Image (cartoon, rainbow, N blue to C red):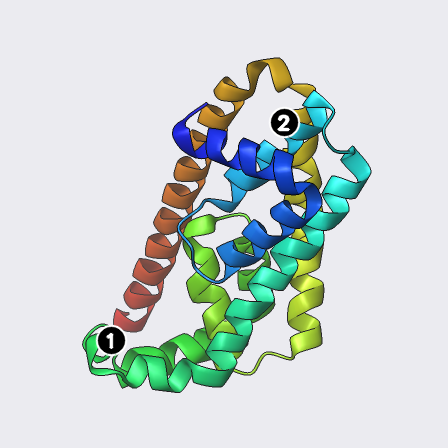
């Protein structure tokens, strides 16, 4: 295990479920700790016998969804002020924000579902969901449905592969990078197709 995973193991061994929940909530608020690593570490502690599998999955589900909802609320409450700040205005122009809102209005539910599986997209998508006033109940239900796939899967796999936890962490990191790259290629091809269609 790397230094981060060892730190998390020690912290979770001491604070157990409360520690796991707190870290996942902080992940949603922007601390630079990969959520997937938290879930895998939690599964590893189930493997070692410190915590129970069913309780761990429940706590992690609540933690990740609540953390995502915090991002949503930030976008809903302070989104306009954040994107209007001079440090962000050159990157997020009014025109780009308007187009992003139109896109999200059309594909919002799918975007929220997909973003749950790609850490690089979670914050901007959930932030935008708040900005465009996606119904909070709808956001939570879609996010929870997506979390029901990844959270139990990562925890259970790290539990059953406890002897090979380092290899599993490496595979997850590489897979996530590959998925993000594929998603970016798909979006680029979609944009190019739309542009060619307008030229015809």
* Residue 166 visible within the image: yes
State the mark number for residue 44. Answer: 2
Graded by Cα atoms within 10 Å as few (under 14), some (14 to 19) or many (20 or more), the crowding at tag 1 reads few
Graded by Cα atoms within 10 Å as few (under 14), some (14 to 19) or many (20 or more), the crowding at tag 2 reads many
Q: Residue at x 44, y 79 (%)?
A: 101
Q: Position of residue 59 (x, y in %)?
A: 72, 49
Q: Residue at x 71, y 74 (%)?
A: 137
Q: Secondary structure at mark 1?
A: helix
Q: Residue at x 72, y 65 (%)?
A: 141
Query: To which residue does mark 1 refer?
Result: 88
State the mark number for residue 33. Answer: none
Q: Is residue 30 left or right of residue 151?
A: left
User: Spatial distance from mark 1 to mark 2, Cα to Cα?
Assistant: 40 Å
Q: Is residue 129 above or below residue 11?
A: below
Q: Position of residue 105 (x, y in %)?
A: 52, 78
Q: Is residue 85 left or right of residue 12?
A: left
* Residue 157 visible within the image: no
């Amino acid at each position: 295990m790397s230094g981060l995973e060892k730190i998390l193991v020690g912290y979770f061994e001491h604070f157990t479920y409360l520690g796991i929940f707190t870290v996942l909530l902080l992940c949603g608020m922007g601390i630079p700790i990969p959520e997937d690593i938290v879930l895998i570490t939690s599964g590893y502690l189930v493997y070692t016998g410190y915590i129970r599998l069913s309780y761990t999955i429940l706590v992690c589900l609540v933690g990740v969804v609540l953390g995502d909802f915090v991002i949503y609320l930030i976008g809903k409450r302070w989104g306009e002020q954040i994107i209007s700040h001079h440090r962000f205005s050159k990157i997020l122009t009014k025109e780009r924000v308007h187009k992003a809102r139109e896109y999200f209005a059309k594909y919002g539910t799918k975007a929220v579902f997909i973003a749950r599986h790609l850490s690089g997209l979670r914050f901007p998508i959930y932030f935008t969901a708040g900005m465009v006033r996606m119904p909070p109940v709808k956001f939570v239900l879609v996010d929870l449905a997506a979390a029901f796939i990844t959270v139990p899967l990562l925890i259970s796999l790290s539990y059953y592969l406890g002897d090979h936890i380092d290899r599993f962490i490496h595979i997850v990191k590489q897979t996530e990078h590959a998925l993000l790259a594929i998603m970016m290629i798909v979006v680029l091809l979609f944009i190019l197709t739309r542009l060619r269609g307008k030229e015809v």
